[in-house]
Amino acid sequence: MSITVGVDPGLSGAIALVDSYGVLVDVYDMPVLNRNVSPQLLHDLDAWDECGPVVIEDVHSMPKQGVASSFKFGRSKGVVEGYFAALAMPIRYVAPSVWKRDLKLSKDKGASRERAVELWPGKASLFARVKDDGRAEAALIAYWWQQFGEGRGAA
């Protein structure tokens, strides 16, 4: 059984583990220290045995997003990429528009939370708060890979 790691990068993002049967194994809020994603705290999670690939949402700066926030967001994504690359785990990327289209979701983060609850009703409490959208999206990214990405040669 393989476990896919889904990553919604960013300070309010998350990391989720979904097995090949679509079962949500675990979800972690992005480990942050001093307002930065922390590779040390990422390492302390120690959850990566028997995991792979790592599917990271391929995000970019957005129009009207400030320079400082764009830089900070890029740094967060880079820390995650570097950490998993150092573990020699295969890294894949998926654009938000692709996984959301395939899962029939809009840009509305509330819809992602609702879909996560539909897929994993026993873990609904993980997605109960508005700020749990990062958890939902990380889980859905891993789920998307299991359902769609693996066979399509996603980036």
Image (cartoon, rainbow, N blue to C red):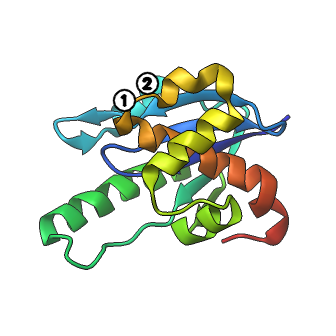
Residue 23, image x and y in percent? 75, 31
Classify residue 149 by image quadrant: bottom right
Residue in the picture at 31% in, 72% down: 61
Q: Residue tagged by mark 2?
A: 44
Residue in the picture at 64% in, 68% down: 101
Vertical position of residue 34 compared to residue 78: above or below: above
Residue in the picture at 33% in, 43% down: 12
Q: Are marks 1 and 2 in contact (CB under 8 Å)?
A: yes
Q: For residue 41, which numbered disc appears in the image?
A: 1
In the drawing, does residue 106 fall left or right of residue 25?
A: left
Most extreme residue toward the bottom is: 63
The residue tagged with tag 1: helix, strand or loop?
helix
Q: Would residue 88 be visible to someone looking at this image?
A: no
Residue type at tag 2: Asp
Question: Observer-nearest residue: 57 or 41?
Answer: 57
Residue 15, image x and y in percent? 51, 39
Residue 7, image x and y in percent? 52, 48
Residue 144, image x and y in percent? 70, 54
Residue in the picture at 70% in, 37% down: 119
- Report the quarter where the N terminus lies: top right
The residue tagged with tag 2: helix, strand or loop?
helix
Alpha carbon separation for disc pair 1 and 2 = 5 Å
Residue type at tag 1: Leu
Label 2: how many Cα within 10 Å (few below 14, some 14–19, many 20+): few
In the drawing, does residue 23 fall left or right of residue 91?
A: right
